Amino acid sequence: SQKIEQNSEALNIQEGKTATLTCNYTNYSPAYLQWYRQDPGRGPVFLLLIRENEKEKRKERLKVTFDTTLKQSLFHITASQPADSATYLCALDEQAAGNKLTFGGGTRVLVKP
Amino acid sequence: EADIYQTPRYLVIGTGKKITLECSQTMGHDKMYWYQQDPGMELHLIHYSYGVNSTEKGDLSSESTVSRIRTEHFPLTLESARPSHTSQYLCASSEYPGTSGHNEQFFGPGTRLTVL
């Protein structure tokens, strides 16, 4: 089955800087890759989806890239704000398995004022 | 804001008790899911449903059972709770194609279960 690796160490970043998170997977390339935000004690919230034939996707201050050769997605938060502090999860869409998602362990981001 | 509800939010219960975690969504989604998540760890899919009277086990083995008698309701039941069941349980729903174009999931707030 698919294995997903996200940096388990928290990312501490100064307000206004760009945070960059990585998501690496080990097996076949998924048709879709999704990113979610999770705040403590809450359920994840969907942020962005990128397809295997897309190199880059943007939404406001968020940018996602998808490199199927490297089996990697990068998630960028530009002009970071303290309100961006949360855990960010990447999830692979196993389309062949009926669109179930496999989640990574997430990376915690802490934006300091 | 996604309209998916879970009750109770917190539950502390003794070993051997039967419990039911409730999950309801008002979005009319066909697909619903239950995940288990320990603190700081990844979500593991334990059950899913593609519609009424459809239920399947997920990737993580679980002693819980689910039912889907109505589209909006997807309860999870533990017949005899044990300390090993202590965890956070998250319910989610989705529908193709969704606003993203492919099946993003909407999550409830979760139920934090503690079995003593």
Image (cartoon, helix red, strand yellow):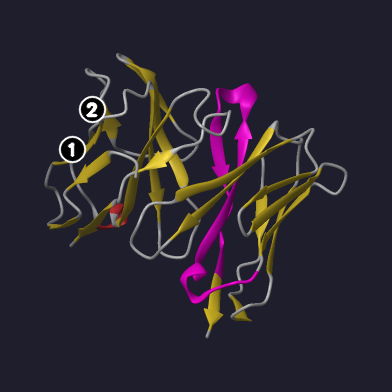
Left-right relation of B79 to A39:
left
Left-right relation of A31 to A49:
right
Q: Dot 1, how many residues are within 10 Å of its Cα: few (below 14), some (14-19), or many (20+)? A: some
Please report, as a chain letter, where disc 2 is located.
B
- Rendered view: B65 above or below A73: above
- Picture quadrant of residue A88: bottom right
Q: Position of residue A44 (x, y in %)?
A: 43, 51
Q: Position of residue A70 (x, y in %)?
A: 85, 49
Q: Position of residue A12 (x, y in %)?
A: 60, 80
Q: Residue furthest top?
A: B53
SS for dot 1: loop
Question: Label 2 belongs to which residue?
Answer: B73
Amino acid at the residue labelled 1: Glu
Left-right relation of A70 to B19:
right
The front one of A62 and A68 is: A62
Give the spatial CA distance, label 1 vs label 2. 19 Å
Question: Label 1 belongs to which residue?
Answer: B79
- Picture quadrant of residue A96: top right
From the image, state whether disc 1 or disc 2 is nearer to you.
2
Magenta segment boundaries in residue numbering: A79-108
Q: Residue furthest right?
A: A69
Q: Dot 2, how many residues are within 10 Å of its Cα: few (below 14), some (14-19), or many (20+)? A: some
Q: Residue at x 18, y 62 (%)?
A: B116
